Image: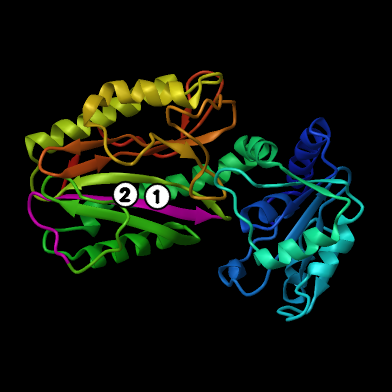
Amino acid sequence: MDFAVSEFENRTGRVQKLMRQSKLDALFLTTEADVRYFTGFRTLFWQSPTRPWFCIIPGDGMPIAIIPEIGAPLMQTTWVDDIRTWASPREEDDGVSLVVDALSQFPKIGMPMGRESQLRMPYSDFLSFQSCLTGCEFIDATPIIDAVRFIKSEAEVLVQQKICTIASNAFDQAVNLFHEGQTLASAFKAFKIELLQLGAEDVPYLVGGAGAHGYEDVISPPDERPLKSGDVFMLDTGATLKGYFCDFDRNFAIGSIGDDVAKAHETLWLATEVGLEAAKPGATCAQIASTMNKVIGDAGGNVGRCGHGLGTQLTEPPSLIHWDHTEMVEGATMTLEPSIEIAGGGMLVHEENIVIRDGAPQLLSRRAPRQMVVI
């Protein structure tokens, strides 16, 4: 496992306390992030949609894993000792009867049903076992799951700090990795290799863009377009270590930097600075977003929010946006991600990773320089 057994005992105990307060008898989980969080079961086999995987958190005691036989050896290395398996994929009953048998004893069953949640199993199978559990009530447990995962332990923070340091070190090599005339595809590949060589276990997320007055979008895959003098080149990475993400970007000027780009970059840096000052326990997401947006003014970009939670997923709740009133608490890891539009159709995005502390937040990413680096 990536952490000591005590880490998973603590996570399970915290969610069970909230379950009792909400009068829930069990949690039913189906996604990679939730199953891994409570069991320690980490595998890339989730990339295959062929097989469903289930985890039940009872009101008392340890998690119950209901998984395909192919996953039993790995699950046995975790702290979970109740592992129920079947030969999957199975046409007539792909784990449904095992789930029905396990859940039948629990009258009130919580599931993630809210914003950013997913059901990772065939919906027809869910309806099938739900119809068999006529005495059970399924209730939205999104708030309590989010509340537990929002606060990171020091062991989690240490892993996040390590992957952020690896990414920061990779960005520091920009002058050696990128150059005028290099294609975007080549630049992306060089950066990914650098991340892996410096110690990242994987780079499942790497996006970016380039343009004379910023970039038009921040999600497209790289193409064969060459970097030109006067371009702004941005890379945004979600590299991982032990399944935990960093998520921040850096902007670079190729050859020279225009006054409009330089001004926009400094505005984002200042917006991030006030975000750092505002990100303290008790401050709400809406308040932090408002503080940052006041610096940017009407030139705000189209990203839609000014940051988000971070952890075993690239993006986690909550969102730094006007309608999210989640309060910051010690141990929460967040991104600060303001964006700005530039005359001429481009935009800039700037991002840092932090952990909320008693007082000023702790930077996990190495703070970007106030002036954009010129390559």
Residue that label 2 marks: 171
Q: Secondary structure at mark 2?
A: helix
Q: Is residue 260 above or below residue 251?
A: above
Instruction: Give the left or right position of residue 120, taking residue 276 as reference.
Output: right
Does the magenta segment cover residue 277?
no
Q: Is residue 162 above or below residue 66?
A: above
Question: Measuring 82% from the left and 71% from the top, which residue is drawn there?
Answer: 85
Q: CA distance from mark 1 to mark 2?
A: 6 Å
Residue that label 1 marks: 167
- The circle drawn on residue 102 is none
The magenta segment:
225-241
Question: Measuring 67% from the left and 50% from the top, which residue is drawn there?
Answer: 37
Does the magenta segment cover residue 237?
yes
Instruction: Give the left or right position of residue 18, taking residue 33 as reference.
Output: right
**Percent position (x, y) of residue 149?**
64, 40
Q: Is residue 190 above or below residue 145?
A: below
Instruction: Give the left or right position of residue 165, taking residue 159 as reference.
Output: left
Q: Is residue 95 above or below residue 159?
A: below
The disc labelled 1 sits on which kind of residue? Ala
Determine crowd level at label 2: few under 14, some 14-19, many 20+ residues with C-alpha closer than 10 A: many
**Percent position (x, y) of residue 274?**
35, 21
